[in-house]
Image: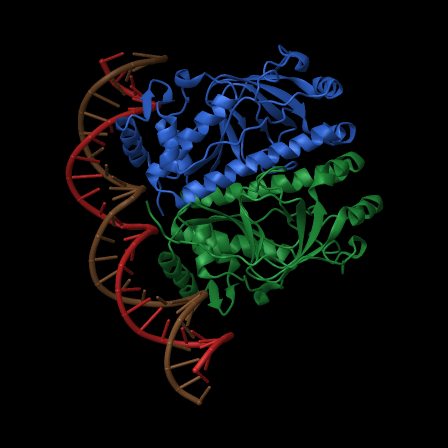
Chain colours: A blue, B green, C red, D brown
Amino acid sequence: MTITSTHTKQYVLPATVQGRLYPCESCPLRSLPAFREAEPDELEFLNRFKKGELLAQKGSAVLVEGSRTPHLYTLLSGWGFRFKLLEDGRRQILNYLMPGDLIGLQGSIEGEMQHSIEMLSDSILCVFDRSRLLELYRKHPGLGYDITWLASREERMLDENLLSVGRRSAMERAAYLIAFIHERARCTGLGSGRRLIIPVTQQHVADTLGLSLVHTNKTLRKLSRLGMIEWQEGGCRVINLKELMVIAGWEGLGTGRRPLV
Amino acid sequence: MTITSTHTKQYVLPATVQGRLYPCESCPLRSLPAFREAEPDELEFLNRFKKGELLAQKGSAVLVEGSRTPHLYTLLSGWGFRFKLLEDGRRQILNYLMPGDLIGLQGSIEGEMQHSIEMLSDSILCVFDRSRLLELYRKHPGLGYDITWLASREERMLDENLLSVGRRSAMERAAYLIAFIHERARCTGLGSGRRLIIPVTQQHVADTLGLSLVHTNKTLRKLSRLGMIEWQEGGCRVINLKELMVIAGWEGLGTGRRPLV
DNA sequence: CGAATTGTTGATCCGGGTCAAGCTGCGTGG
DNA sequence: CCACGCAGCTTGACCCGGATCAACAATTCG
């Protein structure tokens, strides 16, 4: 057995449900080119479906493995990640969360959460009631379809990740991960180009890649020296995306808009 | 870069669509305890939704990465697996397919397939038309919800897999994988207890675990010598499930029925 | 000021990869 | 009938990518 990282953190819980600053009709995300437009009646339904907003601090736990929650969320602003722990504290980060991502369906629609979620920055989440999900499917089948679409997209990302962790070398993995996150963020309209900083520590990268912290550091330094990335206060910046993609043997994200629920 | 397995197989395509041997009303799967019952009107709809049956031989490719298909499938009988390849032939198996699994939604609802599917045994698949999916959501929201439920379940399995490949040792990984497949198969009513043989080669196991064939063999031999599994013509048999679960640190599948579409 | 975090680097070790060979059983063709 | 090739399993010898251990630097925060 190889223990490369042990996590036994005590979590802060996010702030309680607040009033709403962003009615769905004027959702700042929906106007971005990455997202599909919605029918007016769907939008109106969503606005009633939305129960409120949750402010979650950097480092807080929005969901905890093994617990139950009556809520679903859409990340409105901020960054987070999904992860699982083994009993001895080994952590595997499963995927990162960016604005527009639906949170809480992965793993199970009903029942206990099978993974945890922690925020990487102060964030705002739209809160929905799980119990009203069937109502959504009944009244707005198109939205139901969209939710399946999003679940399918999450699966694609997991597939790529699993391929990476299972079959790519350390350099390839690191290059893939950083290029991937960078592209996702760019599509979501976060920071344009060079100004974008991915707000992770090297420990996060290590726990995503299935590598030790030390080896992750050495790999990232190599990428730095090759002029592909820069590590700085607060995270990682991509300098040469194309070269990263070449190393990873990765073609990039498909184009096309995605639904927003 | 570490090349542990190279796959450049030429694929046989499955037989063309046949007439139907199994109308949905008398589906042999639905009566199994693992599956939820369906409303009569849903069942009737599904029966019209079902376009026919596909017979796929052992070793044939039902879906190929990068291609498009107008179909969705439910595996009616037989075994299969989903996988991705890197350009140089390294293969990662993402998950296994057993009766009742919905095939073709993982990765993308529309557009090009992001993964391939190969059958491990002669199989029968129910064929559906992708283009009628939205109709399903409109006419039978409950079935739409079920599809999301199934997508969510697939994600849970991928999460566990990723945790395993990223953070478990070779022994733990192997023990987890075998226990996991065994349990899934048992729930699906495939072979009761000792008589169940998981129809994979050690190369499949290696490509699932992200290990080399040689090391996989050595690890499986250890499990054999410990009396936990037996390897024989055609696959693997579990002898001591509990002990495998202990090694893997795995609690087992949750109970509860799942929908069948 | 000390105590956490986070990044960085070198030395050493080991789990698992690579190479090579041999075994069994099976299907095919001469 | 045997010879051959092929697919799959097995083992030993050796090597290397990445893990572990151990320091240390630079910040930040109480």
Residue B108 position in % (x across, y down): 59, 38
Tell me where residue A37 sits by quadrant. Answer: top right
- Against B222, residue B30 (above or below) is above
Q: How many marks?
A: 0
Q: Which residue sits at x=47%, y=63%?
A: B229
Q: Which residue sits at x=33%, y=47%?
A: B2
Give B3 or A87, whichever is nearer the viewer.
Answer: B3
Residue A70 horizontal side relative to residue B135, left or right: left
Residue C30 horizontal side relative to residue B73, left or right: left
- Against A234, residue A82 (above or below) is below
Give A65 or A167, whichever is nearer the viewer.
Answer: A167
Residue B11 position in % (x across, y down): 53, 57
Tell me where residue A154 sits by quadrant. Answer: top right
Residue D13 position in % (x across, y down): 21, 63
Residue A117 horizontal side relative to residue A108, left or right: left
Give A97 or B176, whichever is nearer the viewer.
Answer: A97
Residue A261 horizontal side relative to residue B30, left or right: left
- Quarter of the picture containing the N terminus of chain B is top left
- Against B78, residue B259 (above or below) is above
- Against A37, residue A218 (above or below) is below
Q: Which residue sits at x=52%, y=67%?
A: B234
Residue B16 position in % (x across, y down): 67, 57
Q: Which residue sits at x=44%, y=54%?
A: B8
Whether residue B149 appears in this view of the structure is: yes
Whether residue A203 appears in this view of the structure is: no
